Structure formats: structure tokens, C-alpha cells
Image (cartoon, grey):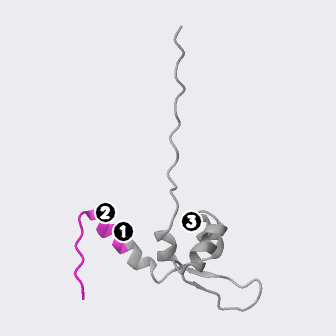
Amino acid sequence: MSVVTYNSPTEILLDNIMRVMEGETFCKDRAAYIVGGQKKLERLIEAGEINVDKPSNSQNGKWHCNAAQVLKHCRNMRPKRKVKPKKEKL
């Protein structure tokens, strides 16, 4: 068993969130929104980065994506800063 050391309270909080979300799942649409699109989600699934379960073998069966793995690959969702235009010198 390895001992994990944390450098900040933020790391502890993130570790707790990931441990809680390990047992949760997201649907395909929600997971695609979080990672940045359906194509990126499919690439992550093919690479083995995100585990997916599809219990029903029907065409419209629901996907169950591992929530912790999806959150690990989430896109930057911070709003972009608006740059103020420079004033012209007269």
C-alpha cells in the first residue's frame, strides 16, 4: 500500500471528489459536453481512457461512462476574458 502525500487542501478536495465519483456514471451526452465534444469522447473511449458500459445491446441503448474518468479529462470551462480595445491616440 502506497502513502499519498498532498501539497495543499485543494489536492485533498480533488482526491475526495474523484473517489466519490468513481462509482457514478454519466450518459453519453453529458460526458461529451464535459470532455469537449462527441468526437473527443469517442477518441478517449477508444484509447481506453474512459470506461463505458452499454447494458442494452439495442441501437438506442444508454451509455454509462465512468464519471471520475470523464471529469479527469474535462475541458477548460472558464470563460475567456474579454480584451478591452485600445484607445486611439489623437
Q: Identify the mark nearer the N-term, 1 or 3.
A: 1
Disc 2 designates what residue? Answer: 10
**Residue 50 on image: x %, y %:** 53, 78
Stretch of the chain drawn in magenta: 1-16
Give residue 22's quadrant in the image: bottom left
Horizontal side, residue 54 vs residue 60: left or right: left
Q: Is residue 31 above or below residue 89?
A: below
Give residue 7's quadrant in the image: bottom left
Disc 3 designates what residue? Answer: 34
Label 1 neighbourhood size at 10 Å, few (<14), some (14-19), many (20+)? few
Q: What's the amino acid at mark 3?
A: Ile
Horizontal side, residue 29 vs residue 12: left or right: right
Contact between labelled residues 2 and 1, with CB atoms less than 8 Å apart:
yes
Which residue appears at 29% of the width and 69% of the height?
12
Q: Is residue 25 magenta?
A: no
Which residue appears at 24% of the width and 77% of the height?
4
Badge 1 marks a residue whose secondary structure is: helix
